[in-house]
Each structure stands twice: as C-alpha cells, then as structure tokens.
Amino acid sequence: MLTRWGFTTVFDIASVLKNTNLIRHLIESGEVKGPRILTVGEPFWMKGGTPIYIKGFLEANHLSIPEVESTSQAIERVRQQIRDGADGIKIFANSSERDETLTMPLELARAIAAEAHRAGKPVFAHVSNNQGTEVAIQGGVDILAHTTPTDELWSPSFVQRLTAAHMALTPTLTLWDVVSKQSNNSPEEIEKGMGRAAQQLGAFSRGGGQVLFGTDVGFILQFDTSEEIMWMSRSGMSFRKILASLTTNPAQRFGYATQSGRIAKGLDGDLVVLGGDPAQNTSAFSRVLYAIRGGEVVYAGN
C-alpha cells in the first residue's frame, strides 16, 4: 500500500491508535519493512456526528470512537491521545449522516485545535462543504483533508483566505472518483464532480497554497498513485509542484525539513528511484523501482 508506491514517510489521518502503534513498533524494530508512520489516531467528531459510512465498520470490528460532547471532554481527549503517541489531531468539521451533513460547532473546533497546538501538534480537518471549511479556517486548523467538489468553485479571494490562514491542502482527488463510481453516478456526473475538484485544487495551487499529496488510501483500496497524479496534472499543477507535494512540502509542514524531503549530504537518505522522468511525463511518479528509507531498501520492484 505504501512503500510499493515510493512512500518513506506517511501521515495516517484516521485509525485506531493502539493498532497503529503496534504497526509502528514492528517497522521501527526492523521486523517489518515500511515507512515512518505519523498518525492522528482516532478522529474527533461532534455528538451525533459519527459518519454514516463509519458506523458499520466500527460495529463489525467491535470498536468504539467516542463522540465529543463538550470542550472540556475534547481537551482531555486531545491530551490523552498525544500522551498515547499521536503526532497530530484530526477533526471532522463536517460529518455525513443519512439525511444531512452536520457541521462541528466552531467553539469545539477551536478548543481542540488550541490544545493540539499547545502540544506542538498539527490539526487536520475533514471537510465536505464550505461550512466545514469555514469552521476549519476560523478554528485554527492546519491542513484541509479533501477538496469539496459538491460545493462551490474556489474563487481567488477564498483561496487567499486559506493561504492567509497558513492552511495546507491534501486534495484526495482519487477518493472522489472511487466514491462516485461506488455510488453508480453517471459518467457525466463523475466528470463534472472531478472537474470541480480539480478546479479547486488548481485555484489553491495557483494562489500559492501548500499542497500535500494524498489519496485517502486505507479508506479506499486503490493503492496505485497514478490517478491522483493524473488529476493533479489536469488541475494545472506542474511537475515541480507535484514533486514538492510528495517531498519538500510535507517535510516542511511536519518539521522534518532538516533531515528529509531533499537529496543532500547529512540528510536521512530517504530516496525513491523512478522508472521514468516525471519532468517529461508526470505518470513516472507512480513507476517506482526502489524505495529507500534511511539508506535501506524497503521496496525493490521486479
């Protein structure tokens, strides 16, 4: 799922923290070859806001992720998750329910973000529409998880508000294609939605926003990165901007710029060898021959 596609460091933005800690231990002990995994652990959603598409999974696996009912409860849970090893915190600024999309109260989002920031941790927000994005902006969120193709196109003034808030974006365009096909949308509906998502990413990138590569893999089972790269290119992102979204941007955003993200003497030796030149064709980003973490080969293609 990860090293095969060239990832030597990843940020997991929703999982059971205990399980992820076990996986991290197996990797760091050398028992399993894999990337450095940063994680938010369990996400935060408001009372009544467990997403409809998550409820069945939680029930089937006998899992419980509590809904947040007060700012005091939220603050204590932020502290506990960080004590337990979380590297960041994620809120659901929007939660999709059967007949509506809920939006987290602003004071709750602010309290969660402020507590995470006190501990020096970044805050992600799942957003579905402009109301959720507004909560993320005013709440002090650092990274938007997703574009919002069911809502309005992003104007230059809207993008300026995002960049003024120093917010990064993980566009997850592949997610929208996968979900649309699962919903049996028509080809015309899919193309319209994907075009809208690509416009939002393009506007954000042109406006100077920091883009972080991500597909929502794990929630979706499409491990191949080629579609995401194709849509990023269609949004107008250049080879160098896509490269930055995979390397220097996340290294800078998450505090690793002095040790990874570039090829330079004294850095960690996290390298990816490609089977083509992405400057000629960006699809080469998905043609991985070797992934090398800390000087050790963690994936070697055939």
Image (tube, rainbow, N blue to C red):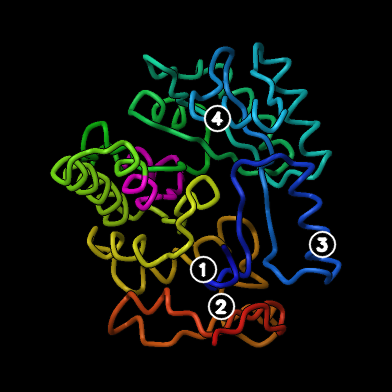
Q: Amino acid at mark 1?
A: Thr
Can you identify the residue that label 1 sits on? 248
**Is there a contact, CB below 8 Å, between mark 1 and mark 4?**
no
Q: Amino acid at mark 3?
A: Leu
Q: For the residues marked 3 and 4, what is the alpha-carbon distance in whole angstroms?
A: 27 Å
Task: From the top left corner, tell me how far across and down residue 264 is, in percent.
Answer: 60, 85
Q: For the residues marked 1 and 2, what is the alpha-carbon distance in whole angstroms?
A: 7 Å
Q: Sequence order check: which comes first, mark 1 or mark 4?
A: 4
Q: Which label sits in the foreground, 2 or 3?
A: 3
Looking at the rendered structure, which numbered label has been put on residue 26? 3
Q: Sequence order check: which comes first, mark 3 or mark 4?
A: 3
Residue at 37%, 14% in the rendered image: 99
Side (left or right) of 21 relative to 268: right
Question: Callout 2: few (<14), some (14-19), or many (20+) C-alpha neighbours within 10 Å?
Answer: some
**Is there a contact, CB below 8 Å, between mark 3 and mark 4?**
no
Q: Tag 3's secondary structure?
A: helix
Q: Which residues are magenta?
A: 160-178
Q: Which quadrant is home to the C terminus? A: bottom right
Q: For the residues marked 1 and 3, what is the alpha-carbon distance in whole angstroms?
A: 27 Å
Can you identify the residue that label 4 sits on? 54
Can you identify the residue that label 2 sits on? 262
Q: For the residues marked 1 and 4, what is the alpha-carbon distance in whole angstroms?
A: 33 Å
- Among the 4 quarters of the image, the one containing residue 196: top left
